[in-house]
Each structure stands twice: as structure tokens, then as C-alpha cells.
Image: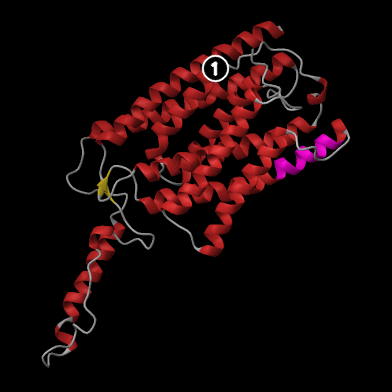
Amino acid sequence: MSAERLAELSDLFVVAAVLLYVVAMVGFAVDLAFGRTRPDRAADGEPVEARQPVAVGAAVRDGESSATTAPSVAAGAEAAEAGAGAVGTASGPKPPNGPARAGTVALALAWLGWAANFGALVTRGLAVDRWPWGNMYEFVVAICFAAVTAFLVTQIRHNVRFMGAFVMVTAALGLGLAVKVFYTVAGPVVPALNSYWIAIHVTAAIIATGLLTMAGVSGILYLMRGDGMSRLPARADLERVAHRAIVFAFPLWTFAVIAGALWADRAWGRYWGWDPKEVWSFITWVAYAAYLHAKATAGWKGRASTIVQLVAFGCLLFNLVGVNIFIDGLHSYADVD
């Protein structure tokens, strides 16, 4: 098959991925909107509503033995344990089977969209005979693929279907932006990018960005979730998903920054030149390092740590879009008119 035909096939795969992601988003939204509600709970697993103030010394009063109050204390503990175990399970009347089926169909469509996204990358690479992330269009298509991959792989081990609608809309919008704004005709890259380092440095950055995107979605859902019953998981669970994604992504981002410096020395004769892309990659690294440091040493959790990680996510997005489009530098490969 000729390079032109492969490039056209890649474009068709992107369109198919967008359509599949959009339909999957609708299915996930139905599942989330009409599925079971869940109570919010604290980080220790206890439902927030179950927390009741207990007066110190109330066990012995007016000569009564503490044994008379033991059954009520034990009952309260059992109720709290039951409430904690109920997180993510049925709460209230069982919903109809329709939303569950919609979620299952949406998950299947998400996998089909993932396959189309993967096909777009493979055919694009074959068309240009290189790694298919040499410009902004290809990079965004690859990041959308990485974000959906992170969601689907996580779903295999943990039930994170509640994130499906938000990950799908993010991937669909990203691919739509790539087609409408960043699209570049398949062809060779600038000489500086014609190196094996593109497979090392950029691949690490893509995987890390996909994981950090999932963490950002979890952080946004954390801020959206209200107190009490909700169809979103408990805030503690959302915070845990974001933290685990960042723990996996941060070493990859660190490696990407180091590999970029090594590539810069090979291409331009210096490891670091304070190019805007280099600066914002470092700022993003510092922001996520601050989040992990605060979680590990200062014991930050809840809204405070979520805000820090969303600030870091904002730095990541600006590094991805803003620097490539609006700021001139050695890394200006967006090819956007």
C-alpha cells in the first residue's frame, strides 16, 4: 500500500476513533447518571454520615457499669464497618439493568475506539516511515491513545468505569482538536527530530502525559463531588486513583526530561539552554514533585493536595499546547498556521 493510501487510512481511523469515543461517552454517562449512588467517606473508610460525636466518660455514669453501654458501642462500630464496606456497592434501591448494560456496551466501544486510535498511529507511522509523533498533530493523537490506554488498563484491575465518560470526552475533544487545529500532512520531520531519541524521549513523555491526564480527570471529579450520597465514588477513592497514577507517571516524566537533555546535547551541543519547552517541562516536574513531597512528608490530603495536582496538571497542559503554539523556540514543531 502506498504512503498516500496509508496516510488516508490513518485519517479515517482517527475519525472512527472520535465517533466511537463519543458514543462510548454517552453510554458511560447513562451508566453514571442512573447507576447506584454511593456515600462519601473519609480516608479511613468510614462513611462521613456515620461519624457521631461521643462524649468522653459516657460509658460510666451514675454508678452504671461500662458493660451496659458495650452493646451500643459495638453496634455503632458494626454499623460504621458495614457503611465502609458498602462503598462502591448498592446503596438504596437497586437501579434498573439498563444503565449497567449501557456501561458494558460503552466499555466495549471504548476498546474499539482504542483499537482505531492505535490503527491511526500505526498507519501514520508506516506512511511516514518513522515514529508517528514528530509534530503536534501526531503527538496529540498519541496522547489521546495513552490516556485511553491508562483508563482501560486500570479498569481491568479496578472498577473505574465512573471515569469513562470524562476520559472519553477528553480523548474525543483531543482528537477533534488534532484534526481541526493541529493537522499536518504526512511527511518528513525537521532534521533535529530525525533521531532514535524520538522513540525514547517522546514515548516516555506520551505515556506519562496519558497517566497524568487520568489523574487530572480524577482531581476534577474530586472537586465536583458533593457531600453525602452521589453517583461518583467517595473522595478518598478519587484521590487514591489520582495519586497512584501520578506515582507511576512521575518517574517517566523525570526520565523524559533527562532523555530530552541528552538529546539536546546530541542535536545542539548543550544539555540545557532554557528554551521555553525545557523551562515548562521543568516547571511541570517541580509542580508534580511538590505534590508528591506534600503527600509524603506534610501529610497533605483531600482538597489541598487535589488543588496542587490540578495546578501541576495545568502546567502540563500549557507545556503541551501553549508553549508549542504561542511561544517560539527550538521545540516549536506544531506546524500550525
Front residue (pair 318, 213)? 318
Q: Kindly identify the residue that appears in the image at 30 percent across and 58 percent down.
A: 85
Name the one closer to the observer, 189 or 158. 189
Task: Identify the residue shown where x is 24% and y is 81%.
Answer: 56
Residue 111 visible? yes
**Magenta-drawn segment:** 255-265
List the single residue furthest toward the left.
62
Please tell me how crowded label 1 is: few (under 14), some (14-19), or many (20+) other residues with Cα within 10 Å.
many
Residue 1 seen in the current view:
no
Of the 4 image quadrants, the one containing the N terminus is top right
The three-letter amino acid code for the residue at tag 1 is Val
Horizontal side, residue 101 vs residue 151: left or right: left
Q: Where is residue 199 in the image (x, y as percent from the top left)?
A: 74, 32
Query: Is residue 109 toward the left or the right of residue 15 in the image?
Result: left
Instruction: State which quadrant residue 48 falls in.
Output: bottom left
Instruction: Classify the position of the C terminus by image quarter.
Output: top right
Residues 167 and 331: in front is 331
From the viewer's perspective, is residue 65 above or below residue 112? below
- Is residue 152 rendered to the left or right of residue 127? left
Residue 330: x and y in percent read: 76, 27
Q: What element carries label 1?
A: helix
Say which residue appears at 67% left-offset and 39% top-offset.
281
* Residue 30 falls in image quadrant: top left
Q: In this view, does 9 lie to the left or right of 329?
A: left
Q: Where is residue 79 in the image (x, y as percent from the top left)?
A: 22, 65
Label 1 sits on residue = 14
